[in-house]
Image (spheres, coloured by chain):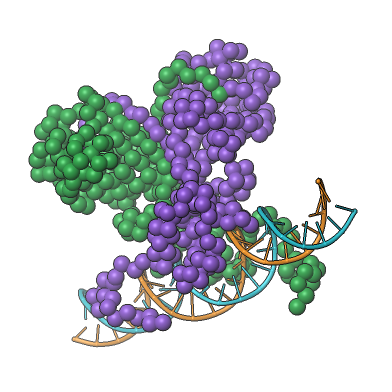
Chain colours: A green, B purple, C cyan, D orange
Amino acid sequence: MGENLPGDAVENGKKSPRTPKHWELKERLAELLRVVSPGGSLPGERALASEFGVSRTTVRKALAELTAEGRLTRVHGSGTFAGEGKLTQRLQLSSYTEDMRSHGRRPTSSLLDARIGAADPELAALLGIRSGDDVLRLRRLRRADGEPMAIETSRLPLPRFPGLDRYVGDSSLYGVLYEHYGVELGHAEETIETALATPAEAALLGNEAGALMLLLSRHSFDTEGRPVEWVRSVYRGDRYKFVATLVSPQSLDT
Amino acid sequence: MGENLPGDAVENGKKSPRTPKHWELKERLAELLRVVSPGGSLPGERALASEFGVSRTTVRKALAELTAEGRLTRVHGSGTFAGEGKLTQRLQLSSYTEDMRSHGRRPTSSLLDARIGAADPELAALLGIRSGDDVLRLRRLRRADGEPMAIETSRLPLPRFPGLDRYVGDSSLYGVLYEHYGVELGHAEETIETALATPAEAALLGNEAGALMLLLSRHSFDTEGRPVEWVRSVYRGDRYKFVATLVSPQSLDT
DNA sequence: GGACTTGAGTGGTTTAGACCATTGCGATTA
DNA sequence: TAATCGCAATGGTCTAAACCACTCAAGTCC
């Protein structure tokens, strides 16, 4: 066939190379979404593909982005539904429980596992212990109104909290620390970044692997500045956002 | 190829872990990445596909995730390269400029446009003015070491800062506010969430549309509690993370 | 009635192949 | 020499088709 003839194919005369089809489709679907109440269902992928005259792959690309943005929820075997809004989590030294309650949500938290292991040098430095010392590792699943929201992995220095593993259950960790060890939290360093869900996380959160996540690492200290815990939490990026209140030092610049 | 591996769990009803090919490939590529220095190049998509015995689509899915995580950089027409690490941005009432400098980065900031428009009711409430009042809208592109990092859109109440639009340039906004209006920042409410890049944002940031972003909204107040600005910033999720220092109220709970 | 089976419909994964858009470099040309 | 052109390689988009895994409800069996 002739190769470089711009005027040959009829349908092939793609006009604007600037906007991909899946993006245009995404906007049309977003429009459609405005008239669907949260939880309402959308047509199937195959139906959308034929309705909009594109391939199913293209439909899936558009749906994938809308899902990542939290505007859609997809359930394997069941269908595609309009998403709910994002919850907000206050970025402060308060507890998950208290935080959710203040938003009128019913928070629950279940202990996935509790293990004791040896600290590697990096973790030891973070927790103020020696490399090889025992570390208690807690993994919890956080829920709001029954819906899985985050996976939280805490690590605490056992030398500082001897016997802590025996007190731990589904109850409040901070409460245990206060009652048995007299520990009060003073401050924390928290970092926030994006991440993608691993298959294991996705399974726990009812997510897809590769979904957008907010990865939150917290390094907590007591009122005397001694390290208390090192926490890595993974939140669903489509369901969560964080709020922080900042107070001024005195910096004036750009 | 043998497809049905009889060794897998079958009659149990509960089946095996089932890892998609693109995920397995992703891990193998991640391994490969550990021996490639930042900026180093990887084989092309087609080469990877044949080398690992999968389709190019599957390769692209794996590469897409690694890219979203900031571990890869892809340049159309040129190739795929190992990514650099993430920068950290302090979550405080300091300035971008000062912040980057403290990390040994060379910060620059260019004004994309400055417009005056009327406030809608929502924005008016945020800025403490009346609906329809003039609002100055500034869009800036933030760079670190010349690399585009974020797009920042600020909105300020013109009734409170008459003539502000004449002072604005590439220079420090907070400096102008202080010198001409005696305004010092007191506190701010900041929310952080995930987002996907729009084509326009992607073009400015040298990103792909649909890339992972950190969306940061800041509502700033002066020392007397009056609203000063409303800012929406979009940061590259593959290049940035945020750090906050939290101080304790006295909450002890889960 | 309750438990089980079955099948249609849904989203999830993968393939092979086509074509487009951008890049960079070597060869050609002014 | 300097600019331009051509082209091959790269990533980006899209298609059509097949098959898998999950869900749910209708139908069946005990």
Does A88 sit above or below residue A25? above
Q: Residue at x 51, y 40 (%)?
A: B235
Give percent across and percent down for residue B216.
48, 36
The answer to whether residue A223 is visible is yes
The answer to whether residue A39 is visible is no
Question: Which of the pair A12/B162 is nearer the observer?
Answer: A12
Does D29 sit above or below residue B130? below
Left or right: C19 with respect to A247?
A: right
Left or right: A203 with respect to C17?
A: left
Give percent across and percent down for residue A190.
35, 35
Total numbered badges shown on the rendered structure: 0
Give percent across and percent down for residue B140.
61, 33
Q: Residue at x 55, y 59 (%)?
A: A62
Q: Residue at x 47, y 72 (%)?
A: B53
Q: Quadrant of residue A174?
A: top left
- Quarter occupied by the C terminus of chain A: top right
Question: Which of the pair A29/A68 is nearer the observer?
Answer: A68
Does A41 sit above or below residue B90? below
Left or right: D8 with respect to A183?
A: right
Left or right: A133 with respect to B120?
A: left
- Quarter occupied by the N terminus of chain A: bottom right
Give percent across and percent down for residue B93.
45, 24
